[in-house]
Image: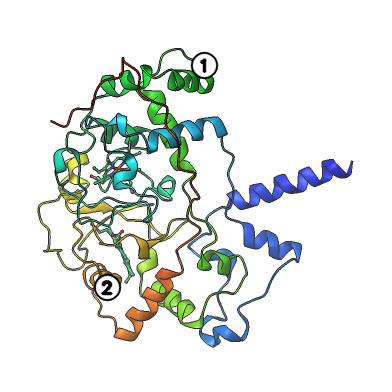
Amino acid sequence: MKLMKFTAISCLLAFAVINGAMPAFIIAGGLIDMGYGSRGGSMVSGLKRSEEPIQPIPVSFDYDRAKIELGKNLFFEPRLSKSGWITCNSCHNLSTGGADNLPSSIGHKWLFGPINSPTVLNAKFNLAQFWDGRAKDLKEQAKGPIANPMEMASNHELAVGVLQSIPEYVQWFKEVYKDEKITIDNVSDAIAAFEETLTTPNSIFDLWLRGYDRISPTEVEGYVLFKDKGCINCHNGFGAGGNSFQKFGIVKPYDKDTQTLGRYNVTKNEKDKYVFKVPLLRNIELTAPYFHDASTWSLSEAVNIMAEYQLGITLTADETNKIVAFLRTLTGDQPEIIFPILPPSTANTQKPDRN
Ligand code: HEC
Ligand code: HEC
């Protein structure tokens, strides 16, 4: 009987966590409600943390263990590329915030891609994938880079053929998908399932939202400015972004890059020119350079550009510093990855081709 009750409570808790309602739940349960207390000052005493427009990243999800292990192998599998050298991790390096810290990525034959690589961390919170949102979800997205001539430069038949030539992969796919034949659909499904696990909970800001005070007064003031100045209108939700498409250069036309048309490429609608998916600001301090065109390496400058082009305001140096201090509290626990050991190729495995 006791055990049953325990289970019911943990289910409720899990439910609350998934709905981002953790603070309310905790407060309702009377466990923790520390308030901001003396450190916040009067400026923030009115904040109701459980109702803030940025929600804490859930701490746990339900995962299919076997599928995500397979997906992890594929994420680190160089043989999915024509050269046998490039992996998803090459450009979405999980050691460096899920991005490559380059203005634009280096792909097959050292080709430079046209656009900055966004992070894969928390990508599940995006309303669609890519800067222009051309893939509807992670599964659809994952098929792209394998066959992109400037990225991994393989094709789906070749990539599937390589996996099919390796008995361990055949066995893993069979266990997960109950199918003798490996398909590109299942390859992307497994990669997407692994990416779903790449979330970064427990940032200082999330802890604050949940009622724990490891944040500093300056950081909270930065958050208040972030809301008061209007950043929050576009950067909100679990990811502090990722849930709408917006024009870059709403108030003042963005002149540093007029070649990349953004959402227009998908819709061919004139009003979608220079419209991009609002990027997630989670872990933003780890993923310089900033913007689709990597026009700055400095987070302060990125904040000032946003103020100028999106809001038509000029921030004081003090305001910029505070907003940057707040943005740094969005860095969460990075996924702990045990580097996979991949099965060896066989005589039937396609040889790498660097041309
Ligand atoms: C050669 C570098 C490169 C490789 C390899 C690569 N990507 Fe990317 N990835 C990019 C770039 C650049 C973009 C942005 C492209 C765009 O928006 O037009 C991107 C976008 C994404 C996005 C969308 C994120 C967002 O916020 O919109 C996801 C998810 C992603 N890649 C996952 C993967 C996976 C999974 C693999 C392996 C199958 C992979 N990538 C391989 C460079 C790369
Ligand atoms: C009207 C919507 C909107 C508002 C308001 C807005 N942003 Fe943005 N933000 C965007 C879009 C869209 C981009 C992507 C621009 C691009 O690179 O094409 C972006 C990009 C960013 C980036 C770079 C992210 C990256 O990964 O490269 C940062 C940092 C940022 N915004 C912070 C802020 C701050 C701070 C404010 C308030 C001063 C703000 N934003 C206000 C829509 C907005």
251 and 118: which is toward the camera: 118
Task: Please tell me whether residue 282 is drawn above or below residue 223 in the rendered image.
Answer: above
| Residue for point 24% across, 35% down | 152
Checking the image for residue 178, the label placed there is 1
Q: Is residue 264 visible?
A: yes
Amino acid type, residue under disc 2 in the picture: Ala
Q: Relative to residue 127, is residue 213 drawn left or right? A: right
Checking the image for residue 307, the label placed there is 2
Q: Nearer the viewer, mark 2 or mark 1?
A: 1
Comes first in the chain, label 2 or label 1? 1
Looking at the rendering, in which quadrant would you find the N terminus?
top right
Within 10 Å of the Cα at label 1, are there few (<14), some (14-19), or many (20+) other Cα atoms? Answer: few
| Residue for point 25% across, 67% down | 310
Task: Please tell me whether residue 102 is drawn above or below residue 328 in the rendered image.
Answer: above
Amino acid type, residue under disc 1 in the picture: Lys
Q: Is residue 234 visible?
A: no
For label 2, being within 8 Å of ligand 2 is answered yes
Find residue 40 and report its horizontal and vertical position in percent: 55, 83
| Residue for point 46% across, 47% down | 198
Checking the image for residue 353, the label placed there is none
Q: Relative to residue 317, is residue 202 drawn left or right? A: right
| Residue for point 43% across, 45% down | 124
Find residue 13 and report its horizontal and vertical position in percent: 69, 51
Task: Please tell me whether residue 157 is drawn above or below residue 115 in the rendered image.
Answer: above
